[in-house]
Image (cartoon, helix red, strand yellow):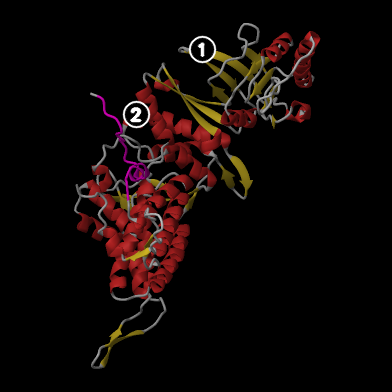
């Protein structure tokens, strides 16, 4: 039996990506998960839960005729205070302490398939992200894991044979295996993105030859053109020439005669990684080559046969800013699972969505965790402790929020005008305090998924955080007990939490400001008929819209 089109994951972004949603507000919420995924690679479910809770608590104020601007002003104030509280409890760490980094990444790897290989996964993630990191000054680093880290899956061997190469590997062989060397120590590498063959016309070109000697002259011109290209390259004495385009047989002859190995039709992304690893510069025209464009940072070029295919290795680089993670395993399924644990963007707080889908992927993305810590080496407590601390701080500050003391509503009727005065403590205080309550959705969801008594657990956790103390107390995701996150080494990256809070509250404010939904779908009409005006529909109409026509 073969199943097709089935996605097995507990990643919030992967689940929402598969949903077919018609409501525009729901589509906007799904975009939040994608944004979170691209920015920090974690917290994709948390941002949806928090944004949904912010909208849920605002519903009561909308029903009481609170203006959305008042609610958004309170939410923005709550966001500022939440970020201040986040900075206060954040803990600085030393990214050069490998044992600390290993414990952090291992604590982020679940007890799923790769739990038994936690040390290996953590080592691979830290080695890869440390290799491609670029110092920006002031303790900040830029780590581009999408562009400069490639995961190469090669079936065969054992999972323990997986490693991070100090360089690049790609699925290519030299152009002439019998004539060109497959192993070069300390190679001089030239990278090109132009073809080393005779330039052909863009359109159909016709040449009329009157004499027989003209044909020989035409062939000679082509040979001279190729020879000039090769001479311009060979005068820099390279050992390896790599081009993204084609390479003619004549150019292959000149290179093999000079003892130079050549590789053609390489991907642009692989060429960029080689340039970063070997210190070379990709050149567009051979006549523009300079000595500084030649890459001399690689220690070894070698072509190896793994299984039925040949792989080229450019490794032992001096200061590589790009690398390849070589994964070995018994089957493709095992390799795909390990790759998901390394690369797929995970969600820390599983919600009830995980009841719909079997969870086999990891909770946290090891690569993104290491990247986030290197970019901004700050940690905050996990297990809902951060959200409870922020909630307690906002509740304490809510009493000091200033605003309008009284709200006057006038109701007009045909017979008389009556006024009803509602004495409220503060119109902006209540939405601010509601935002504080909304932050408790994360630990509450975590308690629900642990199977414990939610009311008792949340009451006890609120008591721990009531006086602004015990900021590191949260919920253990396995047992549901209230424990010290610092002792259990349950951490969360500062960048992830910061992005989650900002994205959720700003998206909630954006949706609250929407007055109506305008349908921009233009229906096909008969010729000569005038186009109908756009229909202005209420939110309830959009909710009740029939998506599947009746038979």
Where residue 5 appears, as percent x and y from the top left, is: 31, 33
Disc 1 versus disc 2: nearer the observer: 1
Q: Which residue is most to the front?
A: 528
Nearest the viewer among 212 and 7 is 212
Where residue 214 appears, as percent x and y from the top left, is: 79, 13
Where residue 46 appears, as percent x and y from the top left, is: 36, 51
Residue highlighted by disc 2: 116
Q: Which residues are magenta?
A: 2-21
Q: Is residue 9 magenta?
A: yes
Q: Going 58% across and 47% down the picture, which residue do you hit?
A: 140
Nearest the viewer among 216 and 410 is 216
Residue highlighted by disc 1: 305
The image shows residue 123, relative to residue 303, as above or below, that is: below
Asked where in the image residue 229 lies, by quadrant, the reply is top right
**Crowd class of label 2 (few under 14; some 14 to 19; many from 20; radius 10 Å):** few
Q: Going 43% across and 37% down the picture, which residue do you hit?
A: 366
Question: Looking at the rendering, in which quadrant would you find the N terminus?
Answer: top left
Residue 462 visible in the picture: no
Q: Secondary structure at mark 1?
A: strand
Q: Secondary structure at mark 2?
A: helix
């Amino acid at each position: 039996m073969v199943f097709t089109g089935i996605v097995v994951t507990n990643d919030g972004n992967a689940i929402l990506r598969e949903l077919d949603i018609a409501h525009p507000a729901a589509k906007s919420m799904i975009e939040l998960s994608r944004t979170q995924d691209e920015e920090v690679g974690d917290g994709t479910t948390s941002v949806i839960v928090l944004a949904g809770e912010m909208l849920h608590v605002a519903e009561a104020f909308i029903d009481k005729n609170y203006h959305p601007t008042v609610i958004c002003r309170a939410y923005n104030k709550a966001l500022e205070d939440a970020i201040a509280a986040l900075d206060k409890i954040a803990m600085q760490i030393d990214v050069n302490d490998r044992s600390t980094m290993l414990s952090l990444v291992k604590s982020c790897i679940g007890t799923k398939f790769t739990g038994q290989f936690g040390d290996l996964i953590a080592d691979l993630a830290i080695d890869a992200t440390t290799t491609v990191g670029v110092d920006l000054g002031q303790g900040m680093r830029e780590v581009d894991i999408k562009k400069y880290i490639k995961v190469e899956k090669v079936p065969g061997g054992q999972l323990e044979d997986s490693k991070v190469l100090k360089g690049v590997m790609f699925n290519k062989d030299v152009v002439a295996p019998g004539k060109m060397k497959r192993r070069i120590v300390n190679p001089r590498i030239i990278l090109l993105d132009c073809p080393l063959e005779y330039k052909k016309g863009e359109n159909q070109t016709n040449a009329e030859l009157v004499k027989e000697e003209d044909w020989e002259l035409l062939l000679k011109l082509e040979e001279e053109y190729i020879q000039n290209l090769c001479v311009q390259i060979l005068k820099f004495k390279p050992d390896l020439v790599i081009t993204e385009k084609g390479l003619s047989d004549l150019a292959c002859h000149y290179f093999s005669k000079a003892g130079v190995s050549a590789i053609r039709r390489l991907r642009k992304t692989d060429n960029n990684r080689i340039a970063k690893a070997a210190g070379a510069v990709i050149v567009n025209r051979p006549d523009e080559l300079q000595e500084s464009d030649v890459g001399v940072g690689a220690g070894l070029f070698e072509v190896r046969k793994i299984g039925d295919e040949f792989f080229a290795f450019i490794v032992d680089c001096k200061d590589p800013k790009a690398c390849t993670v070589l994964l070995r395993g018994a089957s493709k399924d095992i390799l795909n699972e390990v790759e998901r644990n390394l690369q797929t963007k995970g969600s820390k707080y599983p919600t009830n969505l995980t009841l719909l889908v079997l969870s086999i992927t990891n909770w946290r993305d090891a690569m993104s965790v290491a990247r986030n810590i290197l970019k901004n080496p700050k940690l905050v407590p996990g297990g809902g402790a951060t959200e409870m601390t922020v909630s307690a701080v906002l509740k304490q500050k809510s009493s000091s929020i200033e605003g309008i003391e009284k709200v006057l509503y006038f109701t007009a009727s045909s017979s008389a005008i009556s006024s009803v005065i509602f004495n409220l403590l503060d119109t902006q205080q209540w939405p601010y305090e509601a935002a504080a309550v909304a932050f408790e959705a994360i630990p509450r969801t975590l308690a629900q998924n642990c199977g414990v008594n939610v009311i008792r657990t949340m009451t006890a956790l609120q008591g721990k955080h009531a006086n602004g103390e015990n900021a590191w107390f949260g919920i253990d995701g396995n047992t549901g007990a209230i424990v010290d996150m610092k002792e259990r080494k349950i951490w969360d990256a500062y960048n992830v939490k910061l992005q989650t809070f900002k994205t959720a509250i700003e998206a909630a404010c954006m949706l609250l400001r929407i007055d109506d939904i305008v349908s921009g779908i233009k229906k096909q009409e008969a010729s000569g008929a005038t186009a109908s005006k756009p229909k202005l529909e209420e939110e309830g109409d959009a909710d009740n819209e029939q998506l599947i026509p009746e038979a």
